[in-house]
Image (cartoon, rainbow, N blue to C red):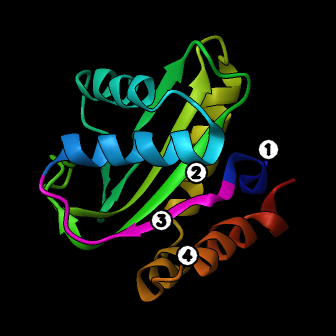
């Protein structure tokens, strides 16, 4: 599994200031709808439903929200870099500025977990995170994310 298969270039965005996690989830749903044609409100609802089980802020300014949706045939990702960090109720109580959301088919099982593990490994790489925070061009952010694991994807 590779990030190039999970993350379309048009699913990478840079946003300014968001006022709430709810607004972030709405934006993630809108980007998913625009990039992949999925139902944006279903995506938003799925993220909120999963978040109600426990926060997906993993620390160090990174959040990995995810949802399983009936309509999907494959796992798809959305990446958002925030110009101003958002309070997210993360495990380390730090605001987040790097958000990688995953949307998986309801019955994806182990593939969903593999995708989540791949994204998690990528987002734990200090060099990748530093490059993501140093750039605001969505095309460059996509390249950083997809190139970072290419040599380690085996």
Depth order, front residue of 118/18: 18
Q: In the displayed structure, would residue 30 be above or below residue 50?
A: below
Looking at the rendered structure, the secondary structure element under dot 3 is strand
Is label 4 in contact with label 2 (beta carbons under 8 Å)? no
Instruction: Find disc 1 in the rendering and name its residue.
Output: 1
Depth order, front residue of 66/22: 22
Image quarter of residue 70: top right
Is label 3 in contact with label 1 (beta carbons under 8 Å)? no
User: Which residue in the rendered view is the most extreme toward the bottom?
Assistant: 134
For disc 3, the neighbor class at 10 Å (few under 14, some 14 to 19, many from 20) is many
Depth order, front residue of 111/76: 76
Q: Measuring 62% from the left and 36% from the top, which residue is drawn there?
A: 37
Magenta part of the chain? 8-19
Does 13 appear in magenta? yes
In the rendered picture of this protein, how many numbered marks are placed on residues? Answer: 4
**Distance between the alpha carbons at the discs numbered 3 and 4:** 16 Å
Residue 124 point in image, percent of width and height: 49, 63
Q: In the displayed structure, would residue 57 be above or below residue 129?
A: above
Query: Which numbered disc flags the more N-terminal residue, 4 or 2?
Result: 2
**Distance between the alpha carbons at the discs numbered 2 and 1:** 10 Å
**Distance between the alpha carbons at the discs numbered 4 and 2:** 11 Å
Depth order, front residue of 37/4: 37
Q: Measuring 69% from the left and 55% from the top, which residue is drawn there?
A: 8
Instruction: Find disc 4 in the rendering and name its residue.
Output: 128
Locate residue 48 relative to residue 38 in the image: left or right. Answer: left
**Distance between the alpha carbons at the discs numbered 1 and 4:** 18 Å
Instruction: Find disc 2 in the rendering and name its residue.
Output: 119
Secondary structure mostly seen in magenta is strand
Instruction: Find disc 3 in the rendering and name its residue.
Output: 13
């Amino acid at each position: 599994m590779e990030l190039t298969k999970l993350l379309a270039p048009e699913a990478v965005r840079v946003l300014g200031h968001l006022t709430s996690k709810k607004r972030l989830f709405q934006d993630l749903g809108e980007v998913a709808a625009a990039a992949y044609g999925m139902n944006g409100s279903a995506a938003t609802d799925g993220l909120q439903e999963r978040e109600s089980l426990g926060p997906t802020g993993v620390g160090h300014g990174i959040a990995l929200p995810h949802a399983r949706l009936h309509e999907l045939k494959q796992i798809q990702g959305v990446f958002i870099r925030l110009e101003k960090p958002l309070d997210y109720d993360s495990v380390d109580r730090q605001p987040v500025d790097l958000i990688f959301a995953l949307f998986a088919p309801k019955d994806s099982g182990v593939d969903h977990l593999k995708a989540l593990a791949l994204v998690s490994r990528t987002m734990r790489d200090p060099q990748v995170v530093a490059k993501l925070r140093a750039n605001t061009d969505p095309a460059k952010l996509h390249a950083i994310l997809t190139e970072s694991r290419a040599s380690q994807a085996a």
